[in-house]
Amino acid sequence: MYQSLWSKLKVSAISALTELRTPGRAKEAGSECMSMTSVALYPMSSFKCLHEFELKCSSIVKSMNTKTSLCVLYPSYSRMVVVPSFLLLMELLYLIQVWSHKEYPLIPVGKLVLNRNPMNYFAEVEQLAFDPSNMPPGIEASPDKMLQGRLFSYPDTHRHRLGANYLQLPVNCPFRSRVTNYQRDGPMCMFDNQGGAPNYYPNSFSAPDTQPQFVESKFKVSPDVSRYNSADEDNVAQVRTFYTEVLNEEERERLCSNMAGALKGAQLFIQKRMVENLRAVHPDYGNRVQNLLNKFNNEAQQVNSNCLIDSWRVVLICL
């Protein structure tokens, strides 16, 4: 049953689902948010659930006086998880789409508290190496193309920036185990360079081996896997909802003003193309930006005319 329902979705990478419960709506914790789409595995390896992790700032960013700044108020982020329904008829893994928190509420699962500043900026910040491919057992990366690219590029960049042994650095190393891999003889070696262990795999000397219980789960793909033309995808519906239902009048004015201010230096045909895209979102959006651009362009034309007149005056005076 699950497979027959799931096959109706555009996302074909996940073939079966466990029971999904509709959670109660979580309160918004703040405006700043970081997210990553992942796949959570359940005890039966053939079942998995697509969801999204989010870190939302628990405090509102605002100015504070001296007395308040001296208080011990650690910045914190609320750890949230979003579990969409498997009947969601949209491209879950489409990078520019936003998962509606109204339809799929945030579920609080924990909190990240930043309770101290770095003792040494170089050791704890410049040598820090985040890597989305480092995940605990039970969590896998989704087929999101952007995330899949980062799974490779992040550790590869760290090896180039910090050296082959960057995982041995105190800020990056495991808490309860020792780094075991086949990387040798590079900079940042903190221990014994793994002694006389071989630096090749497979080998006959009981060196680190793969852990089959942590291999990514298998899944089936029912439709054809092929290249496809994405030109007919809906790229404006969520933006239209944001413009008409989320922003108030003052915020819409600021948005249009900022957009026109960024476009005023572009060539006219570029401005025209962009305004057409904005009108596809909402006619009011495009018309407002176009009116502001007309104002900017007229002012620029007047300035150019005045400069031309002044230059002729200088020429006449010289003659």
Image (cartoon, rainbow, N blue to C red):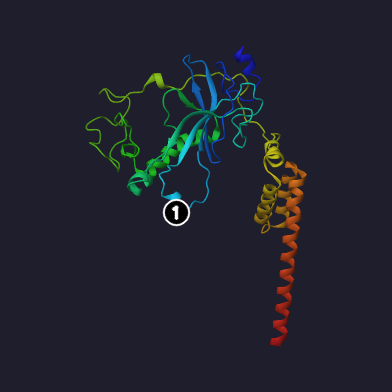
Residue at label 1? Answer: 66
**Front residue of 176 and 92:** 176
Q: Can you name the residue that lies furthest to the front here? A: 67
**Front residue of 241 and 315:** 241
| Image vertical order of residue 145 relative to residue 211, above or below | below
Quadrant into which the N terminus falls: top right
Q: Can you name the residue that lies furthest to the top here? A: 1
**How many numbered badges does the structure rendering display?**
1
| Image vertical order of residue 248 relative to residue 198, above or below | below
Q: Which residue type carries mark 1?
A: Thr
In the image, taking residue 233 as reference, residue 172 lies left or right, namely left
Q: Quadrant of residue 316?
A: bottom right
Q: Can you name the residue that lies furthest to the bottom here? A: 319
In the image, taking residue 263 as reference, residue 291 lies left or right, namely right
Q: Quadrant of residue 167?
A: top left
Q: Pinpoint residue 137: horizontal percent, then vertical percent.
A: 42, 23
State the residue at coordinates (73%, 65%): 299
Q: Pinpoint residue 79: horizontal percent, then vertical percent.
A: 48, 32
**Front residue of 306 and 19:** 19
Secondary-structure class at tag 1: helix
Q: Pinpoint residue 91: horizontal percent, then vertical percent.
A: 63, 29
Q: Pinpoint residue 240: horizontal percent, then vertical percent.
A: 71, 39
| Image vertical order of residue 120 relative to residue 5, above or below | below
In the image, taking residue 234 as reference, residue 111 lies left or right, namely left
Quadrant into which the C terminus falls: bottom right
In the image, taking residue 157 as reference, residue 207 lies left or right, namely left
